[in-house]
Image (cartoon, coloured by chain):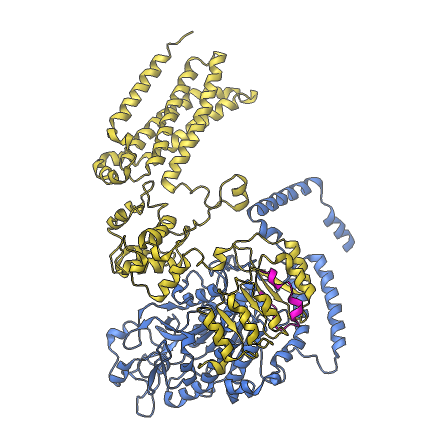
Chain colours: A yellow, B blue
Amino acid sequence: MNRTFLFPVAILLCLLSVILLHTTPADAFFLNESEDLLAETVSESSDISLFFGRFHPVLVHLPIGFLLMAFLLEFMSLIKRYEQLAHAVPFVLLMGFLSGLFSAATGWLLSDGGGYGEDLLWLHKWLGISVVVLSLAAWLLRITLYDDPFYKKIFRVTLTVMVIVLIGAGHYGGSLTHGSDYLFRYMPEPVRSWIGVEEEEPEQLSLIENLETAHVYRDVIEPIFAARCQSCHDPDRTEGELLMTSYENLMRGGESGPPIEPHQAEESDLYRRLRLPDRHDDRMPPRGRTQLTADQIRLIGWWIEQGAPSDPLVTELERPGEIQTILERLTVGGQPFFERVQVAQADPQIIEEAQSRGFRISPVSEGTAFLHVNTLQSKTSVTAEDIEALLPLSEQITWLNLSRTSVQDDDLELLPEFRNLTRLYLQHTGISDGTLARVQSLENLEYLNLYATGVTDAGLSYLESLQNLNTLYLWQTDVTADGAIALRDRISGIYINMGVEFEEE
Amino acid sequence: MSDEIYKCNCNINRRHFLSKTSMGLGAAALASLLSPALLFSKKSDPSAGALDTPHVIPKAKRIIFLFQSGGPSQHDLFDYKPKLTELEGEDLPDSVMGEQRLTGMTANQSGFPMAGARWKFKRHGKSGAWVSDLLPHTAGIVDDLCFLKTVYTEEINHDPAITFFQTGSPQPGLPSIGSWLSYGLGSENENLPAFTVLISRGTGRPFDQPLYSRLWGSGILPSLHQGVQFRAGSEPVLNLKNPKGMKKITRRNMLAALKDLNELHLNEYGDPEITTRISQYEMAYRMQTSVPETMDVSDEPESTYELYGEEARTPGTYAANCLLARRLAERDVRFIQLYHMGWDQHDGIPNQLPLQCKDVDQASAALVKDLKQRGLLDDTLVIWGGEFGRTAYCQGPLTKQTYGRDHHPRCFTMWMAGGGIKQGITYGETDDFGYNVVRDPVHIHDLQATILHLMGVNHERLTYRAQGRRFRLTDVHGEVVHDIVA
């Protein structure tokens, strides 16, 4: 068997490796802890190599086109009608190889400039080089041993492998420039789950176990950066040459200097960018990314005003009332109900059935399965059967409005089943203390409207266990001011309204 | 003959059928893939909103907008500037006025003498908000209110400014805020329109700028969403009553027959506008009962009038409208728009302004208190303010007896209460002359974005396609003012 073809292969491979290795700083291969070295690499690479390097994105599409074309021609030529296409394959392959060689070389120069994530870059670099090598191998096989049926098969396998590697190299190259989630970020939902790409859930912030022992940077501020900023400001991408993965790197800053001026939130670039209008070019996070909430921005502003410290405990810093409230919401159990509790979607069939009984049922908002139940204006009578019709939805119903209906104590026997109720409207109904005995077990209840009902001081004592209750309306009931005050002493932070005339008290 | 044409129309050959249906099927498949909710959602009920769910958890379920038409003088009511009194009579420095565009009414004035408020200002409540002596009742509820000192607009004359406030554009033709919310969120009351309008005249300046019904019009949206004006007197909604001689049963039968005809038509053409029409006739029929029931205040106890003031007994006054607004809110009407006219004090502030304030002060405060004791303030957003403010300098002669102020768009004061707004705060700050914003400006579009946000709507996502593009309330602007959201 004629193996002379191996000579040129070996020579070319050696040549290629020598060229490539020669233009690389030796330690770049072993660069994993890139964070600190990054800045140096940036300054080291010369302008001229960057000048050529920047042609990489221009050149790189040529080999992609040529090599895909070669693949296409080869396999189309299997069809009798297109047989003659096979003659074009060697030329196209050669063009593919040559343009690939230039692309790889310019790519290498570009990567010297730094600013790319090392892991992704490594993958892209070596997949790219593999494409060049494979295209060369394929070309050589094609011009030398194509007539041998065995090598013909080898050639086609090589060609196929080359195309697969080419797609990989192209994909990681795209990820380097556009970000790794670029391709699938806007993929519509059914396709997304169908091909198994996970929906981009806004990353949940981990909760604080105990506010007393929490560190302001590590437990409050850093988690926000981790969830919202680090996907771009990490060693992989280092957007704006700013790394937000450690306190020291953050304070050192990037292209536009240190982002934080301790004690001066308004002067801090980071805080300024967070507060810019959505469509402003400098706004962070950029449009299309999950934005920080108003509370998170307030926390960061507060932290900077406090001097942007890294060490102290939260409790060692001055906390205005508003900040304290926000901090408490970050603790385990201190979160708002809709963030703390998740339920399954209700069965539309059951919703429809309940609606046919005169209930108006609507979702509370996007992204939650909780339901808001109201009665139609025409539905003035609510019976025990009506409540029973709602029972299959007891998990999901969180706001229930039965006001101005005929509902009585006896009709509400099933009320304790509706454990996720946070707002209950019973004003202008015939209920009395009997219902409050049932309300007692609704421990998530935050809002209760009992105005113009028959409740009394005795019934109010049932509510003492409802520690989440924060708003209670008792105008036009038999509850006395003393009864209300007694309850207020039992539930911290509750607001009880007894009508305008009691306001002064 | 028409039979022949019909047959011809039916004569679709195989190729035609396949080419049509394959495209159609493909499009349907793609649509269902991209947005299954859209394709399979039921939109047969026209009272349901265009949004399947609110975008965020709504803090407010309904809005009462107490629009003070004409432009109340913030200098004499809320924005306390002792500097103006100190320098009274001196010209407003050029450095303060800058390049401000003035109206034709004062642009040619020989000077711009500063004019201080003629009334005393005090701080009130725990929050220490400044309110002038003209508004004693409002001063009593400041701890429930959020004052916005730095609202600004681009419009300098009444009609464009009100239109801008209501529709997000100074040119007429776009939907009012109430229409947008009716369209987006639907109605919570099947017997009343989702958007109702109540109008009263000010006693301070009874023959002021007129209002046009297009301010509560639905513009490009289906007419179903336009505001319905409730008038004082025997016929609150025009053309709702049965004509003389028509019995209720006759009307019912007529509507039933009309519905049958419309349904025939619907089956033939499948035009959703016909569904709207059918439901509107039914709604009008139910309103024949629900409107008189809502407007009939005979079930209100005496204490109501102690709260709202004796004026609330006179239909058509601002106080009576505030009472009606509460009754509509109790009935879950989505958007209740009041207009009180007469705030355009170009002159005669000392005579006119106290009258205007007397019209609205007690009733506005009463409304907030009344909503509060009924537990409605938690999910009802109350907004008080006009289309712009008034100048720090005097229009016309500045004498001991009288002075006036021109229109001022650069900053003015509004207040909001309830429905997810922070209580007892003052947001924004103007300069020592109350002429320019120093800190935290709130543009009209920002305010609109915030209002929608409180109702659970992302202002960028509530859009309607017309004239070849999508429209929204805030055009391409608007930022939610998160600092005032509780």
Quadrant of the rendered image containing residue A372: bottom right
Question: Could you say which is closer to the camera, residue A32 or residue B212?
Answer: A32
Q: Is residue A182 above or below residue A295?
A: above
In the rendered image, residue A403 lying in the magenta stretch gets the answer yes
Residue B403: x and y in percent read: 34, 87
Is B17 placed left or right of B221 in the picture? right
Q: Is residue B408 above or below residue A233?
A: below
The front one of A153 and B333 is: B333
Q: Toward which corner of the image does residue A320 lie, by quadrant? A: bottom left
Residue located at (32% from left, 36% from top): A118
Q: Position of residue B127 (x, y in %)?
A: 36, 76
Image quarter hosting the N terminus of chain B = bottom right
Q: Which residues are magenta?
A: A400-418
Is residue A138 depicted above or below B429 in this figure? above
Determine if residue B238 is in view.
no
Q: Residue at x 56, y 22 (%)?
A: A81
The x, y position of residue B380, in whole percent, is 51, 71
Q: Is residue B175 above or below residue A369?
A: below
Q: Is residue A112 magenta?
A: no
Could you tell whether B128 is left or right of A455 in the image? left
In the picture, the quarter occupied by the C terminus of chain B is: bottom left
Lateral position of residue A360 relative to residue B170, left or right: right
Image-quadrant location for residue A379:
bottom right
Front-most of A107 and A252? A252
Residue at image x 29%, y 20%?
Answer: A15
Residue at x 49%, y 26% (from the top left corner): A72
